Image (cartoon, rainbow, N blue to C red):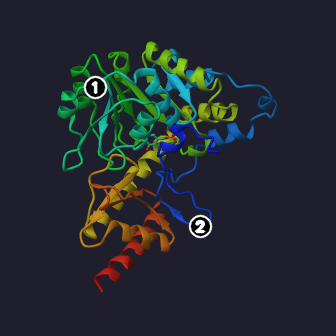
Amino acid sequence: MDFLSKKARAIAPYTAGEQPRDRKYIKLNTNENPYPPSRAAAEALRVFHEDDLRRYPSPDADGLREAIARAHGVKPENVFCGNGSDEVLALSFPAFFDGDGAGACFADITYSFYEVFARFFGIPQVIVPLRADFTLDLSAMRAARCRGYYIANPNAPTGVGIGRAQMEQFIASVPDRLVILDEAYMDFFGESCVPLTARYENVLVVRTFSKSYALAGIRCGYAVGNAALIAGLRCMKDCFNSYPVDAVAQAVCCAAVADKPYYDGVIARVVAERERLRAALCSRGFTVPESRANFLFAGRAKVSARAIYEGLKEAGVLVRHWNRPVICDFVRITVGTREQDEALLAALDRILADHSA
Ligand SMILES: *Cc1c(COP(=O)(O)O)cnc(C)c1O
């Protein structure tokens, strides 16, 4: 007997970057932060009282929503929290799109979870190819027939970013369509559209604690938008899971958002190291689009990206490679500490020397 549904048998799920346990790797494959979370967040974890595990947490993460609202200068009613921004994005599909309506529009090369969610929820997809230089074709997206958009800004896995002014122009030009901005990497760019959520009812910004906050293990993400959009997300959440953000995550993330000075320092270090690593890759003959995120997308003529991925893995350095048209000639490299990146470059030099021998 096959007890699985047709959906479970047919759907191809998202594949997350590998988290191997077989040996100790320099992990530059899932865009984790190489620096630790803030001391305030660690302290919140240390003083967390076990009696708070006995009871259910606040279903809507009220304290955390207040802390996030304060940090962004919005109201708690403008914030929705979920179990990672992946969950927030997942809930947004049934909240804002219908199976029999105009679809969700996104780029061919972007966060591949959008496509999985659209298929899972039966939402039509309108795919717009990136331009040859990996920039988003906003005029083609504007011309597409759709109900709304998913735009990762900066984009994954290319790292290419769109400034706030250009994004505002786009948002203003499609007032009857919802623009969902996935700002997972925005802290490394500093052009967030969160301030636009007060002025445009058609913007929802989704963010995460996993990258700039160095809290990927805690699983927490959030959305900022007008109260009607937030109510739509809450309605979907309450159909799946009343308590997606656990008590520990609420306490730790509250402390983290309040520690802006620490995170400003971490972000500045990652950005400086990103520029240093990009220059080092370019000087080795790699093509690397300018990145606004905490990773670089690098390809090199004459050496296949697959061979680079495999050679690095053998050398104990993990990066990410996709066997997909357009992007199969590139690897995505998370910016690590200076020491980690030096080890990566040394391993790359050995691989390149082997290939030219
Ligand atoms: C990492 C990432 C996310 C997911 O973040 P979580 O909060 O860890 O679920 C969402 N969008 C993009 C583009 C990402 O790279």
Residues packed near mark 1 inside 10 Å, few (<14), some (14 to 19) or many (20 plus): many
Residue drawn where x is 30% and y is 20% of the image: 177
Depth check: give the residue in front, 286 or 125: 125
Question: Which kind of residue does numbered mark 1 sit on?
Answer: Cys
Q: Residue furthest bottom?
A: 357
Residue 314 vertical position relative to residue 47 in the rendered view, above or below: below
Residue 190 position by quadrant: top left
Q: Name the quarter where the N terminus is drawn.
A: top right
Closer to the chain start, of discs 2 and 1, is: 2
Residue drawn where x is 54% and y is 45% of the image: 214
Taking 51 as reference, is 220 left or right? left
Q: Residue furthest top?
A: 228
Q: x, y (%) of residue 183?
A: 40, 36
Residue 249 position by quadrant: top right
Q: Which mark is residue 193?
A: none
Residue 37 vertical position relative to residue 139 in the rendered view, above or below: below
Q: Which residue is mark 1?
A: 146
Residue 357 position by quadrant: bottom left
Depth check: give the residue in front, 158 or 283: 158
Which of discs 2 and 1 lies nearer the camera? The answer is 1
Residue drawn where x is 35% and y is 30% of the image: 124
Q: Please, what secondary structure does the residue beneath circle 1 have?
A: loop
Residue drawn where x is 49% and y is 74% of the image: 314
Q: Is residue 209 visible?
A: no
Q: Which residue is mark 2?
A: 24
Taking 183 as reference, is 39 left or right? right
Taking 4 as reference, is 156 left or right? left
Q: Please, what secondary structure does the residue beneath circle 2 have?
A: loop
Question: Which kind of residue does numbered mark 2 sit on?
Answer: Lys
